[in-house]
Amino acid sequence: MKQRITAALICFCILFSFCACDQIEQPSDTGTIAVTTEATLAPFTVQAVSEEVRIRVAAAGDNIPHDSVIETARTDATGGSEYNFSEIYAGIADIIGGADIAFVNQESPVGGAELGISGYPNFNAPREMVEELIEIGFDVFNIANNHMLDKGEKGYGNTIEYFNSLPVTMIGGYTKSDYDEIRIVEEQGVKIAFLSYTTLVNAGHKNDLSASSRYIVPYADTADITRQVGLAKAQADAVIVSFHWGTENEFGVTAEQQKYAKLCADLGVDVVLGHHSHVVGGVEYLTGESGNKTLVAYSLGNLCSTMLYAKNMVGEILSFDIVKSADGVITIENAQVDPVVSHYKTDTSKKDNQNLHVRYASRVYLMRNYTEALANEHGSQNWGAFTFADLKKYITDNTSSEFLPMYMQ
């Protein structure tokens, strides 16, 4: 744009100099000399030219504050700090920081230390965990998941208030009065709406919100989804929907997932981001009833966890471009997964509060930076032997080659 304006100014100056050669001096009524021109300059304007806009989005799966993840952050802390999560997430900082918009499912309340910081089964993450995720570049946080009421109504309300105090966009946590207020992120002049739904909360907490509560759980419901997608499309250029769905530890897609994915495609949603199963699921484009294409990731797996088994150790960061053409058409392009590995070590001489071997030194790696040596020392080997090739196979068996990076082909 700067080059076009500069060229226009040069032309203007040349034209003005030509006109000046035709100037005629005439006497004025006051005896002074007035300068006029015989040539009349045509009005000059710089035409704005619409251009394609391309926005890179990175989406990660379940970020789980297991006790061993929290203890790792406590062990890594120095200088009087209670927690330091920077080393845990250092391995993904570049890919998240390089995106224009980065999404993550925060699989826990962040209800404040007064409610007790805790891991499984009733999570409550330290605020320092979220602060580090923001530091490396995450700016859209989903909190609608089966653990969202682990600290009851108070924990849910505190989590909403906390995220609303941060310079990020939180989805999945709502009051009844603001449930239909669409959360929109604007990037480079493009408005992107984010919606969020969960198909469940844990059985022990499903009644934690009374009928009179000011809060609402955004359960997946055809009527709500249809209404809110309509509101979102009226206010934004693109729509992304987050779903906490599926069956834990199962790679297959359920009928419920298929139902809601097809609904979103038919409604014209651009991208569906799925999580909950703690293993990776398929990625595909669905065709909506209007012929539109909807990118669907059924499960992004785990971003960070210290679960026990090899299949839970791998997840995916899904990256894609939201492209707005010069004439305003939105397309989703260049979708690709970057596999990640949740790594930890195990001390078999000690037991934790679940009577399991103590897990420690939690780290998240991009699979492209992971090694056979790291796989061999992974603490999960204590619950079943595996190789680095086995970890890769979880990705290649469950993700179409269309979306795999070259080194995974």
Image (cartoon, rainbow, N blue to C red):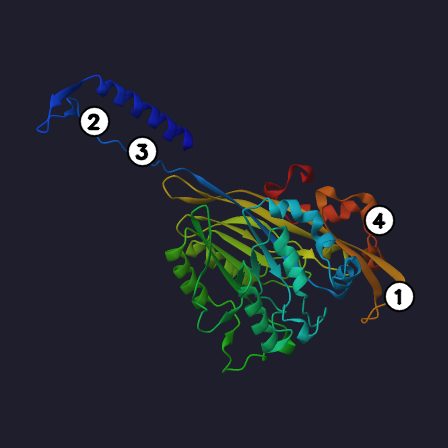
Within-10-Å neighbours for mark 1: few <14, some 14–19, many 20+: few
Question: In the image, what residue occupies the spot 48% across and 68% down?
Answer: 221
Whether the residues at callouts 3 and 2 have beta carbons within 8 Å, the answer is no
Within-10-Å neighbours for mark 3: few <14, some 14–19, many 20+: few
Q: Amino acid at mark 1?
A: Lys
Question: Helix, strand or loop at disc 1?
Answer: strand
Give the image location of residue 225, x and y in percent.
45, 64
Question: Helix, strand or loop at disc 2?
Answer: loop
Within-10-Å neighbours for mark 2: few <14, some 14–19, many 20+: few
Question: In the image, what residue occupies the spot 28% across and 33% down?
Answer: 45
Distance between the Cα atoms at labels 3 and 4?
A: 63 Å
- Name the disc covering residue 350, or none: 1
Any part of residue 153 in sight: yes
Give the image location of residue 363, x and y in percent.
75, 53
**First reached walking from the N terminus: tag 2 or tag 4:** 2
Q: Amino acid at mark 2?
A: Leu
Quadrant of the image occupied by residue 28: top left
- Name the disc covering residue 41, or none: 2
- Name the disc covering residue 46, or none: 3
Question: In the image, what residue occupies the spot 38% across and 39% down?
Answer: 326
Distance between the Cα atoms at labels 3 and 2?
A: 15 Å
Distance between the Cα atoms at labels 1 and 2?
A: 87 Å
**Residue extending furthest toward the front:** 31
Please give the residue where the numbered disc 4 appears in the rendered image.
376
Distance between the Cα atoms at labels 1 and 4?
A: 20 Å
Badge nearest the viewer, 3 or 1? 3
Badge nearest the viewer, 2 or 4? 2
Instruction: From the viewer's side, name the closer residue of 61 and 137.
Output: 137
Question: Helix, strand or loop at disc 4?
Answer: helix
Question: Helix, strand or loop at disc 3?
Answer: loop
Q: Amino acid at mark 4?
A: Asn
